[in-house]
Structures are given as C-alpha cells and as structure tokens.
Amino acid sequence: MNNYQPNERGYWGEFGGRFVPETLMFPLEELTEMYFSVRDDADFQAQFLQLLKDFSGRPTPLFHAQRLSEKLGGAQIYLKREDLGHTGSHKINNAIGQVLLARKMGKKRVIAETGAGQHGVATATVCALFGLECVVYMGTEDMRRQALNVFRMRLLGAEVRGVDSGSKTLKDAINEALRDWVTNVDSTYYLLGSALGPHPYPLMVRDFQSVIGREAREQIIEKTGSLPDCLVACVGGGSNAIGLFHPFLNDESVRMIGVEAGGKGNVLGEHAARFNEQGGGKIGVLQGTKSYLLQDTNGQIALTHSVSAGLDYASIGPEHSFLHSIKRAEYVSASDNEALDAFQILSQTEGIIPALESSHAIAYLQKLAPELSPAQTIICNLSGRGDKDVNQVQEMLLTK
Ligand SMILES: *Cc1c(COP(=O)(O)O)cnc(C)c1O
C-alpha cells in the first residue's frame, strides 16, 4: 500500500518542493511545523469537522442523477454536491481549515489570491466569522468578469486589491499575494486557495479537501454496496479533484479522471490543459512548485484561456503531476463549447445549474458514461454552483 504522502521536502516523486525567495523559507518551515502539529491533533480536527458541519452544512449529499444517467445511456452517475456547501463551492473546506491554523499561529491578518472570486469569497467569509482582517488580491480582468464576487467580498468586510500587472488574472494575483507575504510575514497568514504553491500548501489543501472523498466513499458504499468504478472531477489547481481522489487512491479498481480546460483549441494560449504536451505542457517551476505547466519553447509561461476563470491557470498541483506520471489518474480535457453545452444539459435534466468549472467534468461524462454499463457507477464532483456564471453564459449564448 502506498500512502501517497510527499517526502519531508514536499516532493511526490520529482514534483512539488519549495521554490521561493530565501525570506519565505523560514515562514514556510514554521507553517509546516505548525501544520504537522495540528494534523494529528484531535481537538483541532474536531473543531474543523464541527465548523464544516454547522457553518458549511456538511456532509454534502451524494445525488443519483437518474435522468442524466438515462440520457447518456451507460453508467449510473452520482454527483457529489459541493455546490450545496456554504458560499457555493468546495473552497470553503480549505478556507475553514487554514483560518483555524492561522488562529492557532496567532495571526490577525489573512491574505489570499483569487481568480473567479470563489476562493476570495470563502476566505472573506471565514475571516468575518472570526473577526480577522482580510485582504484579497485579484487581477483587474477577473474583477471585471466577476464583479458580483468583488461586491460579496467587500460586503463581508474584506479589502479587495486589484492587480494590474501581466494578464491581470490569477497568476498575477498570486505574485502580489506572495509579495505582500514577504513584507508582512510576522503578522500575516497567506491562505492559498488550491493544491498548489510551495510545500506545505499542496499537502495541506489536499488534506482539508479530502473530506469530499471520505464522505463520498461512505455514501456510495451505503447507496450501492460497492466502490465506484470511476471518479471524475475538473482540475484547475487541482484541489477539488485531489480531495475526491485521495481517499480512493489505494482502491485499485477505481479509475480516476481529471478534466482540464480545453478552451478554444490545442494551440498554446488557447487552453489551460497542462498535460497536453502538443499544446505546450512541460515540466517546470512556477510559483513555488515543480509541476507540469504551459510554457513556450523558451520556457516563458504561456497565456492561458478558459471559459471558466477557476480553471484558467498555467500550472497544476504537483500531486496531480505525480499521479499522471505513475498513471494512477488519467487526465483529459473538455472544450469551452462542450462545457457550455454541459452547463445547459445538467440544468435541464436534473434541475441543477453547475459552475462552469464543474461543467467541464459533466461534459466529459458524455463521453465516459456511454462506454460503461448501467451496472457501473461514476462519482462526479460537482465542485460548485453556477449562479456566479449565469450572466456570462447568457451573454455567450446570445452571441453564439
Ligand atoms: C476554484 C474552483 C475550481 C478549480 O479549482 P480546483 O483547485 O482545481 O478545485 C473548480 N470548481 C469551482 C466551482 C471552483 O470555484
């Protein structure tokens, strides 16, 4: 049995590690020590689970999507309903875990980066709950695309700082957040939003999100009497996917499939599919971690594109690169148009409007489910709800 833990330097195989300026080495070491001390601490874990339950509404249901299963004509599809958690996505699980850690470390100020705004909203929410100062960095292009989430964060008492450099999106927001952290490291906790960045973040975020897979495993056994045949989840940085996958990694019969953003096409710049090697995906270092990332032939980080801001990032969490390298998980992509179709199909067959990110996972079900038999089961992680995306989809459908 493999326990799928990184080594003491934060590597899964050759992926992960800690590629940061010298000034961040000590704070990251301190964070790692603190994290390992709470990881097995019964009080901390009990407090975490209590908040997941009473504040966020866990466990989230596992829903048998019968009409979708019939329509696709193959496997039985079960949706893990992260869309029903507080603030509308899985991001709250990690925000709760890390804010508890920040409090434990005596930090009064929390900073975060955000792309679509979901992580910023989750962080602002938990900071409000505990009366912590909260600053969220967000690219000005993302602020324009996700204006409602900017308002939500401000309403929750957070300060949103626009980042005007580079492509004015997530990557640039992370750079600014890291810069803030270097300057204010004594008072400030950096709450990273996905299974990315320098050690211990990919490990810590994965652990906090693994509640998804632990619940799903129990729920599917209760409903069907057996393990699922397949797991499917969309992969931006990779936190909702690794959270679902991790508790099943030692169940060899369970296939797991991550769905990346195929965007508009295969050419570098048109997508965010990091494992698409023809499309520019190669091993490299970005924002503290070694993983697959989209780069041009000179090693410059490429621009990315996706209809969903939450999947629009040039790199992917290092544990996914490891699972890809040992072929324990498979990675595929769904295009903008396929996601847009899936957004409407799930709305119309099940009465559930999915986030555009999650719609990529739903889109892939249209290929996968018909290849399986009705006696087989798929758990698809519905990472978030689509309320934030309805205006954007409306515009896209009008101009299509
Ligand atoms: C942020 C987000 C994602 C992508 O992030 P991961 O870390 O890959 O999970 C996916 N779905 C939703 C709803 C999101 O908000």
Image (tube, rainbow, N blue to C red):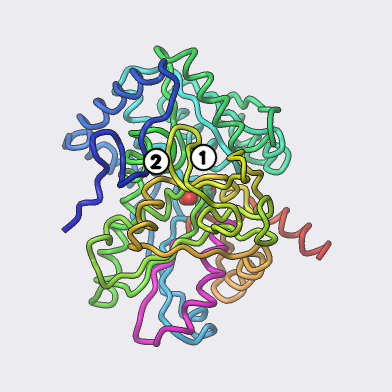
Circle 1 crowding by C-alpha within 10 Å: few under 14, some 14–19, many from 20: many
> Are discs 1 and 2 less than 8 Å apart at CB?
yes
Residue 200 locus on image (x, y percent): 33, 34
Highlighted range, magenta: 356-381
Mark count: 2
Quarter the N terminus occupies: bottom left
Q: Which mark is residue 94?
A: 2
Q: Is residue 86 above or below residue 120?
A: below
Say what amino acid the circle numbered 1 marks: His
Please tell me in which quadrant of the rendered image residue 199 appears.
Answer: top left
Query: For mark 1, what is the residue?
Result: 119
Q: Any magenta on residue 149?
A: no
Alpha carbon of mark 1 to alpha carbon of mark 2: how far? 9 Å
Residue 31 seen by the camera:
yes
Residue 374 locus on image (x, y percent): 39, 87
Circle 2 crowding by C-alpha within 10 Å: few under 14, some 14–19, many from 20: many
Say what amino acid the circle numbered 2 marks: Asn
Sequence order check, earlier mark of 1 and 2:
2
Residue 334 locus on image (x, y percent): 58, 65
Residue 155 seen by the camera:
no
Q: In this rendering, would 26 be left or right of 134?
A: left
Please tell me in which quadrant of the rendered image residue 156 appears.
Answer: top right
Q: Which mark is residue 341?
A: none
Q: In this rendering, would 330 be left or right of 236?
A: left
Quarter the C terminus occupies: bottom right
